[in-house]
Every structure is written in C-alpha cells, then in structure tokens.
Image (cartoon, rainbow, N blue to C red):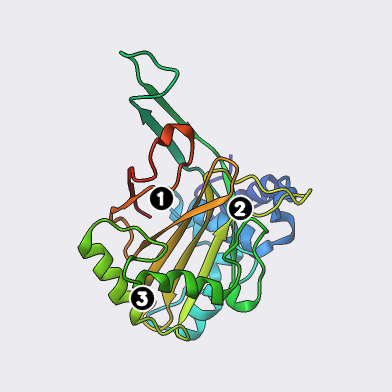
Amino acid sequence: MCDTADLTGCAMEHYRVYEEALLALGAHGFAHNRSMLDDMFCAQFNHPETRAVARDKTCPACRRKKCGGLDHKCYGRAMMKPGVEFDVLPWHQRHDHHAPSCGSNEDFKSEWQRKTRLRRYLLQSGEVPPPHVKVNTTAKYIEAVMSVLQPDGGEFKLTKELQLKAARAKISNVNWNNVYIHAFAAPPDDWNIVYSPAFNCIFVVWEKYSQQLSHYMIVAADADGVARTKYIGLAFDEIYESITGTLYTPLTLSAMNPLHYRL
C-alpha cells in the first residue's frame, strides 16, 4: 500500500499498478493507446475518496484541460477523435407469459448480462463500420432518418402521435453540416468475426454549436445479428413507444407487439 499522505508517490504507485493491469489487456488495444489508458486511469480514480490522487500532476491525463464552455475547437477535436473503444455491460431481461415450452400455469423469465465491446465509428471522416452495419455511410444514415417525415413514419413506427410529431419537427430542421454523427457498433475480433446478437448499431447525433443531443437512432437485430428494425429518439431517458416491427424470435408472436425503449 502506498502512503496516502504522500500524494505524489501515491498517485505514481496507483498509476504504475493500473498501467500494468491494462497493458496486460493488450489484445483489446490498450497497449497501443496511451491516451485511452490515461483517461481510464483518471476516470477510475476521480471519485471523492481518491480525487486528490486523480488530480495529482503525475497523472498525464489529469493535466489536460477539459473543454470549457462553448470551446468549439476543443469540442470538435473530442467529438471526431478516432479509435474510441469501450466495454458496456447491458442488462437483458425477458418475461414471456406464453412461452411455447411452458405449461398453462407457468411463464418464462430470464435475466443476464453480457460484456460487449463497442467502437465509435466516424462516418463523416470516411471510417467504414463492420459489415453487419448496413447503414454504413453518412448519406445512408440521413436517408434512413429522414424517412420519419413520410406520411406513415417511414422506417419508424412510433405509436404516440406527440412523439412522432416531435421527431418529424426535429429531423426536418437538422442542418446536416452542423452535426456530429457517431455510430456505435461491435468491432470485429482478431479473426474478423463480429458477435452482436439483438444489437446492430446505435447512431447518436450531436449539434456542433449548442453541444446538445440532436437525436439518436437504434438499429435492432435478430438473434443472428441481422439488422431488422429502426427506432428514433430525441432525448436521453425518455421512454418511447413503438411496435416491434419484426418477429425477432418465435416468442415474439406478432410484429405488432408494443415495444418500449430509451437511451
């Protein structure tokens, strides 16, 4: 254990141990991305009990200034930084009252978590997402999301009239020259294989000058990872109502089943 009274030495010791642990995960890209390692170190230790350590000058990333106010150049560099990867741990839950294998007085419940690595792809910079992502250019993305303006909602099946109206108003006023479009998808492994059941990709679009969320688009997949349906949203943590739009599994029973989602 390091001496917490000696903040410089303590920070150096924490950083050395953290560096060795992350470099051991070289197959995940940490060994070749010093900036990512530094950022993860500071994020890990930037909580009340160790804030003094995280802000110690021995941590390279903690010396870097965050983008303050509406610093558009700094914000732009951060938003268009290539090679951003991270792990997520999504929680999956199912509750089916009429699962085929269950008896008349039984239902089916399951819960699980699956660690998933995601990469941020910058289509506006010409980055090419993996093959399972079919919306793989900026033009294709704009075409897909603009379909919400069609009388039937295009590729989106929002069932709340107010949510559909709000989506149309937002998309009709997007200045596509003044947004950052981020596509998040599971990257291929060392053998160029992608494992991404149920999830195809998520697009998150940010306004350049207000630095606020413009909208997002979720592309859902079936159990084999094949893209099936699209869902649109305008705000984080708001629950949107749609329909499934496809038979994901035999348990879905109907493509008209209600579906609720949020990001």
In the displayed structure, does residue 134 sit left or right of residue 244? right
> Looking at the image, can residue 166 be seen?
yes
Disc 3: which residue: 171
Classed neighbour count for the residue bearing mark 2: other residues with Cα under 10 Å, few (<14), some (14–19), many (≥20): many
Query: Of the residues shown, which amino acid type is indicated by label 1?
Result: Gly
In this rendering, the answer to whether 211 lies above or below 95 is: below
Find numbered disc 2 in the image and state the secondary structure of the residue it sits on: loop
Residue 245 got which mark? Answer: 1
165 vs 152, nearest the viewer: 152
89 vs 56, nearest the viewer: 89
Quadrant into which the N terminus falls:
top right
Disc 2 to disc 1, C-alpha distance? 23 Å
Query: Of the residues shown, which amino acid type is indicated by label 2?
Result: Ala
Disc on the earlier residue, 3 or 2: 3
- Do residues under tags 3 and 2 come within 8 Å of each other at their CB atoms? no
In the displayed structure, does residue 255 sit left or right of residue 139? left
Query: Of the residues shown, which amino acid type is indicated by label 3?
Result: Ile
Residue 69 got which mark? Answer: none
* Residue 204: % across, % down: 45, 66
Classed neighbour count for the residue bearing mark 1: other residues with Cα under 10 Å, few (<14), some (14–19), many (≥20): some
In the displayed structure, does residue 26 sit left or right of residue 234? right
Q: Indicate which label's residue lies in the foreground, 2 or 1.
A: 1
* Residue 50: % across, % down: 46, 50
Q: Indicate which label's residue lies in the foreground, 1 or 3.
A: 1
In this rendering, the answer to whether 15 lies above or below 2 is: below
> Looking at the image, can residue 58 be seen?
no
Disc on the earlier residue, 1 or 3: 3
* Residue 110: % across, % down: 43, 27
Disc 3 to disc 2, C-alpha distance? 26 Å
Q: Quadrant of residue 40?
A: bottom right
Disc 2: which residue: 186
